[in-house]
Structure formats: C-alpha cells, structure tokens
Amino acid sequence: MNCNVVILSLVILLSGCATQGTNTFKYNPSTLLKIPNEITVSKSYSEVWDGLVKELSKSFYVINNIDKESRIINLSFSSSSPSDFVDCGKSYRTYKQGDKLETYNYNVAGSAKFKVATEKQEHPSFVNYAIINRKPNLEGRSNIYIASEEHDKTRTSITVNTRYIVSVIVKGEAFAEHVNGNVFSRGQIPENTTTVSFNTNQIGQVEVGNPEMLTCVSKGKLEKEVLEMVVR
C-alpha cells in the first residue's frame, strides 16, 4: 500500500507542467564621436617633453619606450573596468517565465549577469534556463608624438593615438527548475571570449551573431588625461 502511495505521488509530481521561459534582446551600438587627441601649446619641445615624462611617471599609465630623438613616448595600460575608457553600446534583455518578468539593462563594456531561457525544454515538468556571467577587460597601447612647430620653435604639438583591445569573457551555468520549485544544476556552459580592437577616432566592430555586430569606440579618457598633463 505504501509503495502504491509513493508511486502515485511520483506520477502526480512528474505530470505537472512548467512554463518554459522566453527571452527578448536589443542592442544599441555606440556612436563614434570625434575625440580631441591633438593640441599645440606655447612651450618649447624640451619643456613639453620633460614635463610630460615627469607627469606620466606618476600616473596610472606605464611608460614602455621613450625616445626623445624620435619624439615618441609609448604607453601601455590595462583595466578591468573598460567602461571607464570605451563605449561599446548598451544591451537590453528580458526573461519572462509565466507572469514573472526580469529585466537586464547594462553597458556592454561593463560586467553583467543575466538569465536566459534555453532553446529546448528537456521535460514538460522542468523549466530550463542558464545564468550568464560576462566580464570585459581592456588592454591598450598609446603613442604620444611630440614635435616643435616647423616655423616657430616656441610652439609644440602633441598628438595621442591609442590602440584599444577589448576582450569580453562569457561563461555560465545551465539549470533545470522543476514545477515544484526544486532547482538542479545541469553543468557549466563553455567559456567564450570575444575580442574587438580599434584606434582613437575609429570604430571597432566584431560579429557576435548573424547579423549582430559588437561596436566599440574610445571615450577619450586617456587622450584627455595625457593632453591635460601638458598644459599643467
């Protein structure tokens, strides 16, 4: 008798239907804006060079190469907060399951965590979904070119050009949620990395889906900070 009760309970438990979730997704790409990356100041070449080297040595940026004869200073930097330096647009997501709605709006150059429904429902009694974590990282190298004006050695021009490399690491975990509320892990989702590269005043694009393109541009933070060091 007890066995029959257990079997009947299992049949009832497994016969319930769970509503599989659905997703929506919208991406607004970044827009290229002209970044001021060149100025001319009323200072001699040596004055600008010495002052800039001094300020850079105290900054967040790392001096890799410096060659006064070639008029170039090369910097490198990295950041786990790319959104400080670059704009990669914004994403808008929703996850709906029955009458429950979850929204996720985030800067693509920033970290984010969201839920997505899987393409298939493994069983009518289970809801299948995944929790996705995305973590961007930024590396860059910048060339600073310093040169006296050809006809006026008391004036010096400074140009900053930067190469940005944005890498977005995406990973996650798949789950199955029973109609009774119990949640079971279904394993890790393989890690995937997307990389987009671009220069100052250029658009960086990479295909992340057909026909979706990830678009990134510089916000001008590095260029502005370097040029401000010159006029201090």
Image (tube, grey):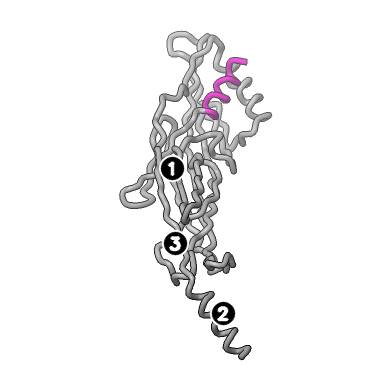
Q: Position of residue 128 (x, y in %)?
A: 48, 64
Relative vertical location of residue 230 with respect to residue 66 in this rendering, above or below: above
User: Where in the figure is residue 191, as x and y percent of width and height?
Assistant: 51, 60
Residue in front for this viewpoint, 226 or 204? 204
**Above or below, comparing residue 132 to residue 151 in the picture:** below
Secondary structure state at the residue bearing disc 2: helix
Q: Residue furthest right?
A: 58
Q: Is residue 49 magenta?
A: no
- Which is in the foreground here, disc 3 or disc 2? 2
**Comes first in the chain, label 3 or label 2:** 2
Quadrant where the N terminus sits is bottom right
Query: Which residue occupies 48% across, 42% down?
Result: 108
User: Residue, x 38% and y 46% (percent of image)?
Assistant: 206
User: CA separation, marks 3 and 2?
Assistant: 23 Å
Q: Is residue 39 above or below residue 90?
A: above
Magenta stretch, residue numbers: 221-232
Q: CA distance from mark 3 to mark 1?
A: 38 Å
Query: Where does label 1 land, which residue?
Result: 197
> Residue 232 placed where, x, y %?
62, 15
Q: Amino acid at mark 2?
A: Ser
Q: Which of the pair 115/151 is nearer the observer?
A: 115
The residue singled out by tag 2 in the image is: 9
Give the distance between the C-alpha atoms of the residues marked 2 and 1, in whole angstroms: 58 Å
Residue 194 locus on image (x, y percent): 45, 51
Q: Amino acid at mark 3?
A: Gln
Q: Nearer the viewer, residue 126 or 224?
A: 126
Q: Earlier in the sequence, mark 3 or mark 1?
A: 3
